[in-house]
Image (tube, rainbow, N blue to C red):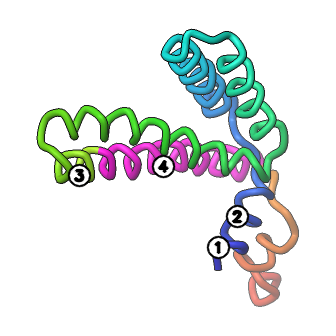
Amino acid sequence: MVKNFINSIVQRRFNQTSVALLWMESFIFAAIYGAMFHSWPVFGILFLGLAALMSRPKTAVYTIFVLCFLWSFVFASIGYGIGGAAGAVILGGLVFLNGVRLHFRDLKQSWVDADMAGVINATEWRQRWGWQNLN
């Protein structure tokens, strides 16, 4: 089921806004972790690793989960300082789910844009219209 989900996403393309958002987040996290460890190699390795994940459409989906996990870790740390373990789980979980929802909403919007432009494959066309509508 998960493999089918990822394969369906791979067949689509990201629009320019969602790609720019992913690149910006990658740079921000690489800079934050590089400054946190006082190390240029940490910055470089993290940024190049995230760039490698975004180099292909199939692995760009995994980049979404990695970046959302990084955001949830930051906010779970804040939640732990405020409300202990329960605050960390609640705040980190909410940030992770909302981040995934935001990125996949952008991806879905690019699907709608692609469909509006008439760029759909034959399988989708058959599923939407089928042979019964050709009369």
Which part of the image, by quadrant, shows the N terminus?
A: bottom right
Q: Amino acid at mark 2?
A: Ile
Does the magenta run of residues contain 126? no
The residue wearing badge 4 is 100
The residue labelled by disc 1 is: 2
Residue that appears at 72% across and 73% down: 3
Q: Residue furthest right?
A: 122
Q: CA distance from mark 1 to mark 2?
A: 6 Å
Q: Amino acid at mark 3?
A: Ile
Spatial distance from mark 4 to mark 1, Cα to Cα? Answer: 15 Å
User: How many C-alpha atoms fall within 10 Å of the one at disc 3: few (<14), some, or many (≥20)?
Assistant: some
For disc 3, the marked residue is 90
Q: Give the x, y percent position of residue 46.
A: 68, 27
Foreground residue among 105 and 100: 100
Name the quadrant containing residue 30. Answer: top right
Comes first in the chain, label 2 or label 3: 2
